[in-house]
Image (cartoon, rainbow, N blue to C red):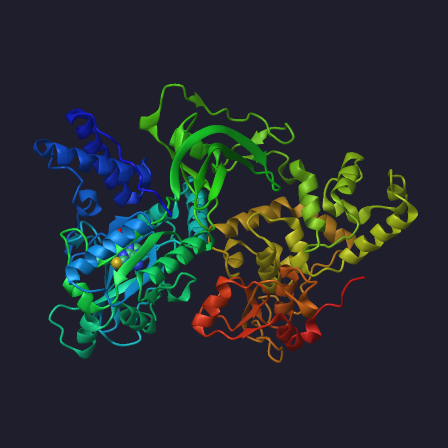
Amino acid sequence: MTETPPFTALADDTAYAEAVQLAVDSAAAYYADGTSTIDDDAYDRLVRGIQAYEEEHPESVLPSSPTGKVAGGAVVGDVPHTVPMLSLDNVFGAEQLADWAAGVERRLGRPVTAWSVEPKLDGLAISARYRHGRLAQLVTRGDGSAGEDVSHAIGTIVGLPERLADAVTVELRGEVMMTASQFEQACAKRQAHDGTTFANPRSAAAGTLRAQDRPYVCELTFFGYGALPAPGDTSDLAVGLREWPHSKIMEWVAAQGVQTTAATPVAGIVATTLDEAQSRIGEIAAARAELPFGIDGIVIKCDLAADQAEAGFSSRAPRWAVAYKLPATEKITKLLDVTWNTGRTGVIAPRAVLEPVELDGSIVTYATLHNVADITRRGLMLGDSVTVYKAGDVIPRVEAPVVHLRTGDERPIPIPEVCPSCGDAIDSSQERWRCVRGRGCRAIASITYAVGRDTLDIEGLAENRIKQLLDTGLIADFGDLFFLTREQLLGLERMGETSTDNLLAAIEQAKTRPLSRVFAALGVRGTGRSMSRRIARHFATMDAVRAADAEAIQQVDGIGPEKAPVVVEELIELAPLIDKLVRAGVNMVEPGATPPSEEPEAPAEGLPLASMSVVVTGAMTGPLAALTRNEVNELIERAGGKSSSSVSAKTSLLVAGEKAGSKRAKAETLGVPIVSPEEFAEQVAAFIPAPSL
Ligand code: IVH
């Protein structure tokens, strides 16, 4: 699958010393906050180059050399580990894996009984110490023999419960990381705070785990991959943890309520032959690009305790386990150009044009560059070599310039002086630059969004018609649509009597849409369709939404302290448009919802999906085939349920259509009931909208 990467050849002692210094600095930065300016591949090549040089010139070996040290010798901590937290040796490809396995079997003098094959999670190793079932202490890997106490993070890590199912004393080991959505949220929080973002999920997790006094809290995720008894413990459990196969230990860990990869599409398996292991490696590698969290390889372990004990350890890594590395998700490439685009809400965003580079199975040519302040802070220049990150769901992003690769030919990045879309001035008073026309700048895009099928659903209003209405000055925003007269429309080119009457009828019809859709049509920054539904259900009327301050807005599920003030600000900016809609007689009420000031939200008793959390995945068939995903979610909410996009232990029902993938697998593992679209349609038949003509 992967070729062995070549190494950096070092010419002499000076080049060797420079390489050692670079490796030490990079490792220190990587383990401190993940800001290393060389990518993993380059680091591996560098260390292999150092190793090769040291083999040829043993007299020149520097004591600071990273070779043979856990974490490149970068980190120290003051909490000793009961059992060292080791590294893993790497293999790159099937052949090297077979060589490694043959080595293990030579040492055992017999075949390995069974292999455990599981993903190598791309985060940070952590030891979670439980006393009598309570999470008592969290310690990082550090240098392998002692780590740093990061217990302050307890309570912010999904999958690492504060209490286990049993009141046992045990040490769990696993990986702390950020999922793609946690990473997006963390970047948004940091953007709102100081205009910068995190380079990639791994460094975001590293920084977050160690951060003690940040004014914002970012959520992390834990996946367990091992459990150890306390030294000297002779309880049945302790004996079990020493004697059970790895696969059984992992089942026990999951039964304690701790997250393992068992509930993911890349669950660990036990293989009895190396061929079987190899085919699972292929499956995990293939699933990688779709995963909502990063993996950087596959770990192959001897499953049986007896095999592990006989294989033993080297000073740095176990001999009974190995990491099969997958291609890097971070690489160095050239920043060729930066283009600027004004979005629907008027925000001006820079985009990097890159020398194409393959990352996580796809060719990356464009990447996000966040905002101007970020470019300036990083000191990015055109022609720079930059580290670029792309994995799974995460949008490709430029991390940082690689300053030591500069040639002197780099040029400053031209920063626009006027809006790249309309040429008007730029409001640069905030980190996020905006066109002074705001939404007006991209009127066609915002009106098209407002009248779309999942918002006001005005049929017959295509983009070219919207452009025509804007060009002729008949409208400036979508509120003006409701004041159009028959005469005005008939006066337009390519507009006959029938299309005019149809359009007027469609516009009239749009006045009756529920508040959730009217709110979504406004295109409030940071609120999409599902958030608009939550806001509408929570407040019930537009008046109540407009009367809410940031604190009241924050009561809506999913709106945090960063988003709430933005929503308030946006509603003030949108006031003239909202007033116009009110004057036109557009509905401003959410059917079936009660404003928070009145009765406490009555549970939707009597409705078929009362107090159920429902997830929909795959293609809908039968009576639901004609509905958009947004319409199915609306249907769930009308029937008293809550629609959600991800399966968890709290999910009550999964509606799985054709080609349902990882969500179905997860629901099966968690024992969440699964129904087909047809079965679901029967359950909620009374709530399905009649097909429009
Ligand atoms: S087993 C002594 N299993 O990889 C055995 N490690 O390069 C080492 N890692 O420090 C741990 N996923 O942070 C193991 N499924 C997995 C893993 C895993 C990620 C990390 C772990 C370890 C590093 C070694």
Vertically, is 26 above or below 551?
above
Q: Position of residue 8 (x, y in %)?
A: 26, 32
Residue 421 image-quadrant placement:
top right
The C terminus - image quarter:
bottom right
Vertically, is 513 above or below 344?
below
Question: Can residue 162 be seen here?
Answer: yes
Residue 386 image-quadrant placement:
top left
Tell which of 213 and 61 is nearer to you. 61
Vertically, is 179 above or below 73?
below
Q: Residue at x 38, y 53 (%)?
A: 178
Q: Residue at x 37, y 45 (%)?
A: 327
Tell which of 157 and 544 is nearer to you. 157
Q: Position of residue 507 (x, y in %)?
A: 80, 53
Q: Position of residue 366 (x, y in %)?
A: 50, 37
Direction bottom: furthest residue: 606
Tell which of 281 and 414 is nearer to you. 281
Residue 245 image-quadrant placement:
bottom left
Direction right: furthest residue: 497
Residue 288 falls left or right of residue 634: left
Direction top: furthest residue: 408
